[in-house]
Image (cartoon, grey):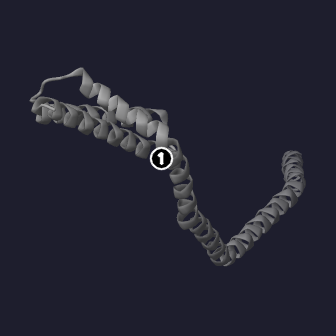
Amino acid sequence: MSEFIREEVSIFIEAAWQGMLIAVCYDALRILRRVIKHKDIIVNIEDYLFWVIVGIAVFSMIFQNNDGVVRGYIFLALLTGAYTYHKSVSLFLVRYISKILNFVITLLLKKPLKWAKMIIRRVLKFFAKPFKALGSLVKRKVKSEKKHKAEHEKHNKKKQPYHAEVKKRGKYNDKKKKKRKARNTGD
């Protein structure tokens, strides 16, 4: 085999390996998305950044190995490597690594956080009881004062017309007295 063909075959194998590496990196991104839920806009940004980085890596590999000469067989090798990885172990790895990571995160983070949250709530509830009791006492006292004030006003309203009537009669009587005096003195 000639030196030229050996070099082309080694470039093909390296490109196939790089295609597998690209697929492994994308699977890592897929696993991350299964473990941590992402919004659509974040997924789009991640994909964009991933493919920009992949493009830079592929063209730097082409530039280093083939002096920047773009050949179709390099892209064929990239696709072959990625496709081979995808059909062989990709589905298995993504499914089971995601399950394992979800289990570990649940075991190490979610359950302890749930227990800590429950303990904190109970402690806060315990320390809040005296303040609730004090608040309830103040509320009853204020309500009692309002009720007492309302009863006092109600009682005063009942007396007020009587007092007003007495004053009216008193004034009326005073006017009568003045008229009588005026008549008596005028006689």
Which quadrant, please, contains the N terminus? top left
Judge whether residue 45 can be spotted in this image: no
Image point (51%, 53%), residue name: 97
Rendering coords of residue 177 (x, y %): 88, 51
Q: Which is nearer the eye, 131 or 108?
A: 108
Question: Badge 1 local density, few (<14 within 10 Å), some, or many (20+)?
Answer: many
Q: Which is nearer the eye, 45 or 130?
A: 45
Rendering coords of residue 86 (x, y %): 45, 37
Q: Which is nearer the eye, 146 or 47?
A: 47
Compared with residue 82, is residue 124 higher up or lower down, i.e. above or below? below
Classify residue 16 by image quadrant: top left
Give the labeled residue for mark 1: 31
Q: Which is nearer the eye, 183 or 36?
A: 36
Q: Is residue 92 left or right of residue 178?
A: left
Rendering coords of residue 12 (x, y %): 24, 33
The residue tagged with tag 1: helix, strand or loop? helix
Judge whether residue 10 can be spotted in this image: yes
Image point (33%, 42%), residue name: 21
Rendering coords of residue 72 (x, y %): 25, 21
Classify residue 150 by image quadrant: bottom right
Q: Is residue 120 left or right of residue 169?
A: left
Query: Label 1 amino acid?
Result: Ile
Q: Is residue 155 left or right of residue 73?
A: right
Which residue sits furthest front?
Answer: 1
Image point (77%, 69%), residue name: 140
Compared with residue 184, is residue 152 higher up or lower down, i.e. above or below? below
Label tally: 1
Which residue sits furthest top?
Answer: 72
Compared with residue 103, is residue 123 higher up or lower down, i.e. above or below? below
Classify residue 110 by image quadrant: bottom right
Q: Is residue 106 left or right of residue 25?
A: right
